[in-house]
Amino acid sequence: MKTKYLIIVPDGMADRPVPSLGNKTPLEAARTPGFDRLAREGAVGLARTVPKGVTPGSDAANLSILGLDPARYPLQRGSIEAASIGLPARPDTLYFRANFITVKNGLIVDHCAGHIGTREAQKLLAVVNREVLNGSLEGSQARLYTGVSYRHTLAWRAPAPFRARLLSVHLDGPHDLVGSDVQQHLKPYASLPHVEIMMKTQKVLEAHPFNRGRKRPANMMWLWAQGEGKRLPTLRERFGVSGAVVSGVDLVRGLGKLVGLTVVNLKRATGYYDTDFDEKRTAALRELKQKEMVYLHIEAPDEAGHDRNAAMKKKMIEVIDHKIVAPILAEVSRWPDRVRVLAMPDHPTPCSIGTHTSDPVPYVIWDSKHPLTRGMPRFTERLAARSARPIMAHTILREKFIHSREAL
């Protein structure tokens, strides 16, 4: 009997009690028979995905779930997403995350430009490449590459002294700056090359016909999270397993690539509310039949948290449960192979504040051949907190999931 491993990551699903939901979290308020089956028949715990002193980003949090300590393997998401889209890790090149954002009356009002479509974004990227990044910048070369929706990558090839200038300041991610004054935030760094580029993109994009009449125009490009390309220990090297990553987000696809997972190309994955949940489920089951491990990531709850929309977050959790978790459990329960499932959010994205936190998250481990009868009645933050003290998430694969081959 073979053992298969499925990791389900509902991005940002964990939360804090919300008054509009009767002081329940969106997960507590949601109807989740699939997650609750995991909790009843599995082992529930609480984990810290972000170590003390590390920024609570999806990069560090997903790295933890994949079994690597973010404090020991610091990465910047620009280099991770570069790996996702196939850019080589050159020693003379830095990689930036490049977001299309919306600025109005000098304030950042939307971190994602109304979730601009990828095709529309490609046209604007071509304009910025042509009108802002054309030619050499102090002996360096910079170029934008297409990602998904508002998330893209800038590759900046430059001599070492120039790279040191680019690395001297890391700007905050735009999702943490909604409502902030652009000039006030950037003024201390105005002489830095990437900040100069950002200000130039605002002038070019404001005048572009695509942005006329749009409620959330893509009228500035925000460059952040720059880093050098790096190699990570693979899952094969650490645990003797390999597999695939199913996600619509370049960051997660890039992390998967860096730890040796094959990236599954999805046709209708958007990383937003309108992503094709059925396609993700089908792809995950197909890959799990053929491979040892699948890392299945769903972004929608995180986006609802950033939008501070508790009702939408509750709805997205229910959709994930109905379209992904419950049917996957029904399917793998019939397989002759043993299937172990780890389900956990990468970090909380509380609707009350609209950004990530480093609070512990609930997790559950379930085994198709060894269901428990002493589990929790539901999968929620509060019940998980009562079960045990938080452990470090990067230890779960080694100590509880892959190398723990007996019954839970």
Image (tube, rainbow, N blue to C red):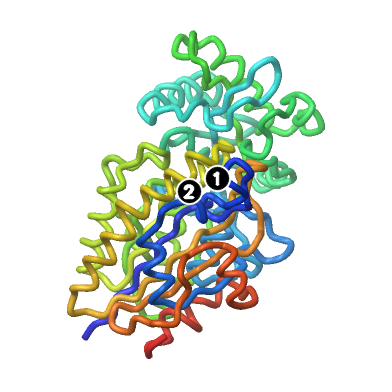
Query: Which residue is rendered at x = 44% and y = 27% of the image?
Result: 116
Query: Which residue is rendered at x = 63% and y = 73% of the image?
Result: 390
Could you tell me which quadrant the C terminus lies in?
Answer: bottom left
Q: Secondary structure at mark 2?
A: helix
Picture coordinates of residue 392, whole percent (x, y) = 61, 73
403 in relation to 93, above or below? below
Q: Residues within 10 Å of mark 1 (few under 14, many from 20)?
A: many
Q: Secondary structure at mark 1?
A: strand
- The tag earlier along the polypeptide, 2 or 1, is 2
Picture coordinates of residue 248, whole percent (x, y) = 38, 46
Q: What label sits on residue 81 in the rendered view?
A: 2
The residues tagged by marks 2 and 1 sit, at their Cα atoms, a distance apart of: 8 Å
Callout count: 2
Picture coordinates of residue 347, whole percent (x, y) = 57, 57
Q: Residues within 10 Å of mark 2 (few under 14, many from 20)?
A: many
Q: Are marks 2 and 1 in contact (CB under 8 Å)?
A: yes
Left-right relation of 16 to 185: left
Q: Amino acid at mark 1?
A: Tyr
Picture coordinates of residue 334, whole percent (x, y) = 18, 73
Q: Amino acid at mark 2?
A: Glu
Residue at the bottom extreme of this rendering = 406
Q: Which residue is mark 1?
A: 95
Q: Considering depth in this image, is 298 or 88 the residue closer to the camera?
A: 298
Say which quarter of the image contains residue 267. top left
